[in-house]
Image: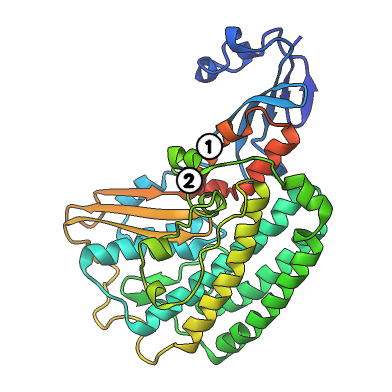
Amino acid sequence: MNLFVNPFHFSSISENPADMLGDFYSDNFERGRLEKDSMLVNLGPQHPSTHGVLRILGELSGEYVLRAEPVLGYLHRMHDKMGETKTPYQFLPNMGRVDYLHPIAWNWAYVGAAERLAGLQAPERAEHLRVIACELNRIASHVMWWGAFVLDLGGVTPILYAFEEREKINDMLQIITGSRLTMNYFRFGGVGADVTPRFARLVREFIPYMRERLKMYAKLVTGNVIFRRRLAGVGPIDADLCYRYGATGPVLRGAGVPYDVRRAEPYGLYDRFQFDVPVGDSNCCLGRYQVRVREIEESLKIVEQALDGLPAGPIIIDKAPKPNWKLPAGEAYFAVEGARGKIGIHLLSAGGKNAYRVKLRAPGFSNLSLFAEAAEGTLLADALAILGSLDLVIPEVDR
């Protein structure tokens, strides 16, 4: 007898679990395709290891994964459609709610697309501030992933350190953004607030502090023999798999491909700064882990350079768009490197008060798409490690 299992209740539901899945799943889990003695398992949609309202519908043979298919839609908010029914200023706060761990990258993507369409150029000082804010936010995102990933594997202590680092960064970003989560710092033609002496002092103090913490991370987690043996060789994701699903960011770089939007399609001032693009020594979970930890150090380098070179001047152009601003007719695409990969926004305007079409390209969606293939044939525990190594933020995946 097969079992249909949800995260909180285990019971025998049906002799044939496919009967319980409804028409939506009939093509993938019909009666004839279920293996003998296999078991259907629901991971989520509310489960700590899914990092949000994600559901993984899996077929298991003992502890081995025969199939594992992500099920989306539990958090869908129709951001694209809201972008077509709101003015640019009304829609801009939405960007902080797409990816709550790296909202400033989404700020940049939307503002960058609108500025490219309208031919606007932010002042030099604003460009430096954009880089500083975005990289600090990237560090916070990677640190939170570091703690949560180890927590997925059973290690509780690192997440406590991760929150400590994140709170320090939020203390800084709150000064210039006024928020600690759904930040809305960018403006069309500049940024919303200038830095203060306290902000600059906190950043200067944080950089050497974080570098010392990375040494502690290496001793506590990265060099831990149990941790390394748990991840080495688990969940190989090669470049071909990434290309087929459009995976980017640390997932692609973990496969050995040095693609980073900040280098490949430079925007802002990134072409002026010296930083490396880390790639994984292996394409397994451990390789993806190493990429993200090394990227924290690279972001620290960028913040340091941007702060050292911060010029005087305005933080927004003199003739900045007003709240009733209408996008000029035309279309534009703008991409940035988010903590999870390539963020892209395509704007199409007919010259009205709202954009005719807004298309958001979320890296997490593409990265998650390869999970079904990557998890096939693995142990269930290893499938969870693979899922965690993708660094998923479900509001971004679902949009």
* Nearer-the-camera pick, 182 or 200: 200
Whether residue 283 sits left or right of residue 244 in the image: it is right
Which residue corresponds to the image point at 45% horizontal and 49% vertical from the top-left? 362
* Nearer-the-camera pick, 257 or 76: 257
Rendered location of residue 192, percent (x, y): 41, 77
Which residue corresponds to the image point at 26% horizontal and 72% vertical from the top-left? 321
Rendered location of residue 372, percent (x, y): 57, 32
Mark 2: which secondary structure? loop
- On residue 370, the disc is 1
- On residue 247, the disc is 2
Residue 27 in sight from this viewpoint: yes
Quarter location, residue 67: top right
Q: Amino acid at mark 1?
A: Leu
Rendered location of residue 37, percent (x, y): 74, 12
In what quadrant of the picture does the N terminus appear? top right
Residue 89 in sight from this viewpoint: no
Q: Residues within 10 Å of mark 2 (few under 14, many from 20)?
A: many
Which residue corresponds to the image point at 21% horizontal and 69% vertical from the top-left? 119
Q: Are marks 2 and 1 in contact (CB under 8 Å)?
A: yes
Mark 1: which secondary structure? loop
Quarter location, residue 345: bottom left
* Nearer-the-camera pick, 314 or 145: 145
